Image (cartoon, helix red, strand yellow):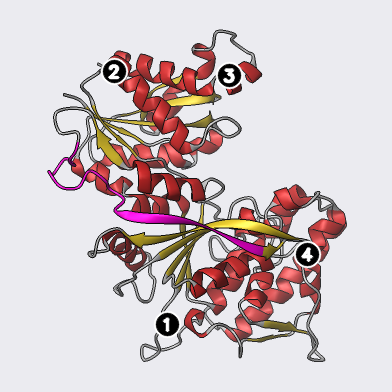
Amino acid sequence: MMRVLIAPDKFKGSLTAAEAAEAMERGVKRALPRAECTTIPVSDGGEGLIEVALSTSRRGRVSGGDNAHAGHDGGSASYADYDADLRVTRVRGPLGDDHDARWVLIKPAHSNGSHAGRIDEFTESSGSPDGNEGHDSIAVIEMAEASGLAWITPGPDASLRADSYGTGQLIRAAVDAGATTIICGIGGSACTDGGSGALRALGARILDGDGNDVAFGGKGLCDASVIDTSNLIPDLRLRHSDSETHQVRIIIATDVSNPLLGDDGAAAVYAPQKGAGPEEIDALEKGLSQWATCLSRFNADFDPANEGMGAAGGFASGLTALCSAVTVPGFDAVAQLNGFDDALGAGADLLIVGEGSLDKQTLSGKVPVAAARRAEARGIPAVAVAGAVNVQKDELADAGISDVIGLAEISDRAGDKDDTIQHAAEYVERATEKLVRRFQ
């Protein structure tokens, strides 16, 4: 009996990660009716993270085979032993208009709270100052929900004014709800404000030389001189000695390694996506440089050149300098949260990954490759289904993916993108069946 671990990311524009996992499971069953399938939808920590958190609590389970109601070790069939509750909070958008933003509050389904234990172990290995503490509940938020590009029309003015205040409101709502760990996926940000807006929502003030609050957005940081944290939520404060404790920590999930400043920094690389031209990029770079000076005055250990400080318009810079926050690779955080690593450890004969497009970015460590490399380290082969395959098979093989099928190979109307999107679930199912039959 073959044991198959199914762990796709979303197929953007057509299938959520959970829907893709369901279609793949059906495909496996068509090829091998008695196969034991474990489905764990995954994410890189960006858009789609909320759906993964919700779906994993419902779908991270074993089905089929002779042991359909138990895990490989005879215990619970669910690797994600928590209950996930979808919450909605009214927030300020990146340009000041209010809207509803979703987030997830996760609590242990059992008294042992092992999901928090997995996060504890991960943050300890990642250098978090209190990775050995117990944590009862986890909040999962997406920056895109509160401060994302979907809430603006990209342009020069928007690129200068957009702020992350709404994301700070989500963090505050999570703290108020009792979350002790907050996982923040920061993909799809509309802002280049260094996280200053979020910090304001959490109680900090950003002041100019005369003691006045500076304007919101990246341009406003050009006037920043002092950061006042006297009203910052106490449980979020960065501790400065072993005698100090805090009760809440923030895990910033990102796959971006850019520094805050310079040619590879937040303004130069990402502001154009938000509508910035050369003049706006120069203004935003000046603002972030001034912001880095303020952060360094507050926290001598802050270094704007560190990897990830430029992610999401510099969001990580402000949060890590002032709060109990740490940046981690997005997939690493998700794999700890949803039990992907536990499922690999339990054993599998095949891993099936997938996403909308396999391309050069995939090879740099995006979800399919990150998952395949984890499996390869345990001697588990990996294959992939993708909406489009824009990379050579030998390159994928070098990255740990031994076989791949694009939906164009399955489509009844090859080359018709609309048809592929409309029938994505059917084609993913058929592609998976074909892959599994080839693998046998």
**Residue highlighted by disc 4:** 96
Query: What is the number of the mark on residue 289?
Result: none
The kind of residue tagged 1 is His
Residue at image coords 39%, 85%: 245
Residues under numbered marks 4 and 1 in contact, where contact means CB atoms less than 8 Å apart:
no
- Mark 2 vs mark 1, foreground winner is 1
Q: Earlier in the sequence, mark 4 or mark 3?
A: 4
- Looking at this rendering, what residue extends furthest in the top direction? 412
Residues under numbered marks 3 and 1 in contact, where contact means CB atoms less than 8 Å apart:
no
**Residue highlighted by disc 1:** 246
Circle 1 Cα neighbour tier, 10 Å, few/some/many (<14 / 14–19 / ≥20): some
Give the left or right position of residue 61, taking residue 411 as reference: left
Q: Earlier in the sequence, mark 4 or mark 2?
A: 4
The kind of residue tagged 3 is Thr
Give the left or right position of residue 218, taking residue 378 as reference: right
- How far apart marks 4 and 3 lie (CA) works out to 38 Å
Q: Quadrant of the C terminus?
A: top left
- How far apart marks 2 and 1 lie (CA) works out to 50 Å
Range of residues picked out in magenta: 69-90
Q: Earlier in the sequence, mark 2 or mark 1?
A: 1
Circle 4 Cα neighbour tier, 10 Å, few/some/many (<14 / 14–19 / ≥20): some
- Tell me if residue 398 comes above or below residue 343 in the rendering: above
- Tell me if residue 411 comes above or below residue 274 in the rendering: above
Local secondary structure at mark 3: helix
Query: What is the number of the mark on residue 439?
Result: 2
**Residue highlighted by disc 3:** 420
- Mark 2 vs mark 3, foreground winner is 3
